Image (cartoon, rainbow, N blue to C red):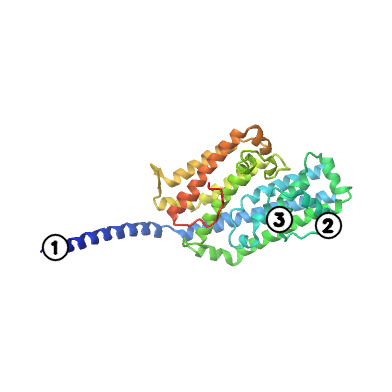
Amino acid sequence: MKKIIFPFLSIIVLTLLFSNCKKKKTEDELLEDNFDKSGMLSNYADNVITPNFNIAKNALDSFEIAYNNFIANKSTVNLNLTQQKFIRAYITFQYISTFEFGPSETELIRSNFNTYPCDTTQINSNITSGVYDFNIISNLDAKAFPAIDYLLFGKSQTDATLVALFDTDANAANRTNYVTNCISEIKTKLNTVISGWSSSYKNTFVSSTGSEIGSSLGMLVNQLNFEIDLLKNAKIGIPLGKKSLDVALPEKCEAYYAQNYSVNLAKHCLQNIENVYLGRSLNGSDGLGLDDYLDALKAEHNSGTLNNAIKNQFAIAKQKLALVQEPLSNSVTSDAPTVDIAYVELVKLLVLLKTDMPSVLGIIITYQDGDGD
């Protein structure tokens, strides 16, 4: 009888174990199924992504008008107004850089709009010759926002000197055209992205409710993390010396020539990352976002929820970044410990967003940053 009873009991035990595992899996699936992923993606498309692109377009249009007015009436007053409008356009770029998928990926807006530090030698060579092609790789760091930053603000030059470079200098006409062409390229690509979202891509984005590679959620989470990697590394870490054996590289700062805006751009970048995580629009409307999804899945972290851990770390990172003084190019040498504290808190936030969150959501991080975090 033993030979019959023991196998029979084993079968019962295995059946019970399998049933329990299956029940656990079913509960997890029910939590996921009960969350409105399509509604979340619709919120992102309608209230976060599309409005951000439109705001960026409006800011760019305002900058273009100011620049054309400056060229028509070259004065320090009009130069200053143009500089202000440029910074505003640069700020709004921080709110669209995250969305490099779909039409934005096709246009490669990150690299085409904001490869810095710019190559001033290449820029000056292009202006002197008057012959250049923004589509070739050698001009990737000689155009768009970083190039305009250099040309409008210069390095330790007075406003009167900068006006003269656009007015009486031998290359004034070529310089004028160079900035015009930089604006034109940004405007063309931005309009193409907006058109793509307003036509067919929005429906494609909202209807892709899976979490596999290439899904809307997968791309959103990957790009959100890519953006915070850029914030941690390019905006803060590299100027601080994290990639150069702690030798500060202030000339690597974003908006290096405008000087007093590098930290501000980093703050806006972090604010946008938080907005995307929360599904929050620029006007403060809080819709369905990744935070709600994590709560719906009952994601835990240590003794609390993963969502609360992430939100708390956002608050800490913002607080520490706010302590960094402008210009960042000075702070990385004169107050490196304060900058380093902000950097460390960004690393902690990145771990939560890049490791803990994707693990819960079943999303694979497909990009490589190469720094080991």
Disc 1 marks a residue whose amino acid type is Ile
Q: Which residue is mark 3?
A: 140
**Which image quadrant is residue 156 in?**
top right
Upstream in sequence: badge 1 or badge 2:
1
Label 2 residue SS: loop
Q: Which residue is mark 1?
A: 5
Identify the residue at the far top of this view.
334
Residue 38 sits above or below residue 82 on the image: below
Q: Nearer the viewer, residue 120 or 169?
A: 120
x, y (%) of residue 241? 63, 40
CB of mark 1 within 8 Å of CB of mark 2? no
Task: Tell me which residue sits at (61%, 42%) in the image.
Answer: 236
Residue 340 sits above or below residue 145 on the image: above
- Horizontal side of 270 relative to 156 (left or right) equals left
Disc 2 marks a residue whose amino acid type is Gly
Label 3 residue SS: loop
**Residue 130 numbered mark, or none:** 2
- Mark pair 3, 2: CA separation: 17 Å
**Which image quadrant is residue 267 in?**
top right
Identify the residue at the far bottom of this view.
200
x, y (%) of residue 161? 84, 42
- Horizontal side of 94 relative to 216 (left or right) equals right
**Residue 317 numbered mark, or none:** none
CB of mark 1 within 8 Å of CB of mark 3? no
x, y (%) of residue 174? 84, 54
Label 1 residue SS: helix
Number of the front mark, 1 or 3: 1
- Horizontal side of 7 relative to 44 (left or right) equals left
Q: Report the number of discs.
A: 3
**Which image quadrant is residue 155 in?**
top right
